[in-house]
Amino acid sequence: MGVSFISDKLERSPVMSCNMPYGFFQTKNAKYYTYPEKIVIQPWHGQHHTYAVFQIPNGYQHEYLFRLKIPGEPIHCGGLVPVKQNFLAGIPRKQGYYLMQGYLNTRIALNLIVQGKINQLLQPQNWQLGYVKK
């Protein structure tokens, strides 16, 4: 029973589940997508060491979750947090843009690495964040 409770909680976590009703915009207007400027894959350092940094144009609202699409794998999602600094580890903020950092669950990253998919994790085209005009 305890395992069932924990499993249920993990499935509802916005960091692990792409089924969150608030995670993605349903819109008739144009939806755009961006890919990360930087990807960091270091899950052996603990939580919060597998992430991507996205740049979103000012005047646009980003979705609340990003998608990680690796061929042969289910789509994984992760949560986003704003980056307060104008400069993040070698990524200058473009004029007219703001930075968002998307975190992938450490267990998901480790599982993909064990499967030999670290190169796919490092490919920007596999990380996707949608955004719409405000």
Image (spheres, rainbow, N blue to C red):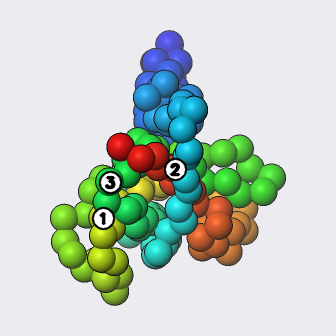
Residue 58 is left or right of residue 107, and the answer is: left
Q: Secondary structure at mark 2?
A: strand
Q: Nearer the viewer, residue 62 or 28?
A: 28
Q: Which mark is residue 130?
A: 2
Q: Which mark is residue 115?
A: none
Residue where numbered disc 3 is placed = 59
- Residue occupying image coordinates x 33% and y 67%: 97
Q: Nearer the viewer, residue 128 or 70?
A: 128
- Residue occupying image coordinates x 37% and y 51%: 60
Residue where numbered disc 1 is placed = 98
In this picture, is 21 found above or below 116?
A: above
Residue 51 is left or right of residue 120, and the answer is: left
Under mark 1, the amino acid is: Tyr
* Distance from the alpha carbon under mark 2 to that under mark 1: 14 Å
The quadrant holding residue 123 is bottom right
Point out residue 79 in the picture as x, y percentages from the top left corner: 40, 46
- Residue occupying image coordinates x 30% and y 76%: 95
The quadrant holding residue 52 is bottom left
Q: Return the disc, 2 or 1, that comes first in the chain's sequence.
A: 1
- Residue occupying image coordinates x 54% and y 38%: 29
Q: Secondary structure at mark 1?
A: strand
